């Protein structure tokens, strides 16, 4: 109580503020800060005696329905491509599994192993391309 300097206190304890503070900064929100000389009880009495402002109805722009951006929708061809990609990816996964099973054959010659490896790598590369395109279209569809 006898401290001669300035002390900045941030608190929600009303009793504490009533006993300690003699000047307040009241944060209203949206960057608005009121400078009030007095304690919390004084501020409450002052604030409740002010005439209440009637809140304005929300602006029409806030109540309108937000429409999806037309540029984000899939075109007809993209929709067809999106549907076909899923089945193509599944088909490639089956082909990949079949080739991997073939690698278990102990009678494969080094030449056959090399051919299967190249074929498998081609399938993996094609799958990666198709999956990337599928992700692009699905992202465009969701936004």
Image (tube, rainbow, N blue to C red):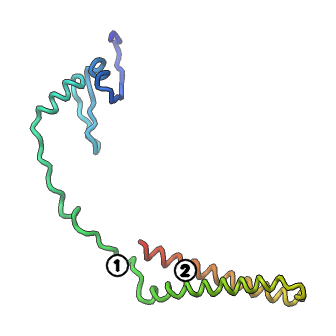
- Place of residue 117 in the rendered image (x, y in percent of width and height, measured from the top left): 79, 84
Quarter of the picture containing the C terminus is bottom left
Q: Is residue 111 left or right of residue 120?
A: right
Q: Earlier in the sequence, mark 2 or mark 1?
A: 1
Q: Is residue 98 left or right of residue 103?
A: left
- Place of residue 121 in the rendered image (x, y in percent of width and height, measured from the top left): 73, 82
Kindly identify the residue that appears in the image at 29 percent across and 22 percent down: 15
**Residue 79 occupies quadrant:** bottom left
Q: Which residue is mark 1?
A: 70
Q: Residues within 10 Å of mark 1 (few under 14, many from 20)?
A: few
Whether pointer 2 and pointer 1 mark residues with C-beta atoms closer than 8 Å, the reply is: no
Q: Is residue 129 left or right of residue 97?
A: left
Q: In the rendered view, would you say 11 is above or below 72?
A: above
Return the residue nearer the eye: 99 or 55. 99
Return the residue nearer the eye: 15 or 140. 15
Q: Residue furthest top?
A: 2
**Residue 112 occupies quadrant:** bottom right
Give the CA distance from mark 2 to mark 1: 20 Å
Secondary structure under tag 1 reads helix
Query: Which disc number belongs to residue 42?
Result: none
**Residue 67 occupies quadrant:** bottom left
Kindly identify the residue that appears in the image at 29 percent across and 21 percent down: 21
Give the number of callouts.
Answer: 2
Q: In the rendered view, would you say 101 is above or below 51?
A: below
Secondary structure under tag 2 reads helix
- Place of residue 110 in the rendered image (x, y in percent of width and height, measured from the top left): 89, 87
Quarter of the picture containing the N terminus is top left
Kindly identify the residue that appears in the image at 15 percent across and 29 percent down: 46
Kindly identify the residue that appears in the image at 26 percent across and 33 percent down: 26
Query: Which disc number belongs to residue 133?
Result: 2
- Place of residue 54 in the rendered image (x, y in percent of width and height, measured from the top left): 11, 47
Q: Residues within 10 Å of mark 2 (few under 14, many from 20)?
A: some
């Amino acid at each position: 109580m006898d401290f001669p300097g300035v002390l900045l206190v941030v608190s929600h304890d009303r009793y504490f503020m009533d006993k300690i503070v003699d000047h307040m900064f009241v944060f209203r929100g949206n960057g608005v800060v009121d400078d009030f000389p007095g304690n919390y009880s004084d501020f409450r009495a002052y604030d409740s005696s002010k005439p209440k402002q009637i809140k304005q109805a929300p602006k029409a722009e806030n109540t309108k329905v937000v429409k999806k951006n037309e540029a984000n929708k899939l075109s007809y061809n993209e929709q067809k491509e999106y549907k076909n990609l899923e089945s193509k990816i599944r088909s490639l996964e089956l082909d990949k599994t079949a080739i991997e099973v073939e690698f278990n054959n102990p009678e494969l010659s080094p030449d056959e192993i090399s051919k299967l490896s190249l074929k498998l790598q081609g399938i993996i590369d094609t799958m990666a391309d198709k999956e990337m395109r599928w992700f692009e279209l699905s992202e465009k569809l969701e936004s």
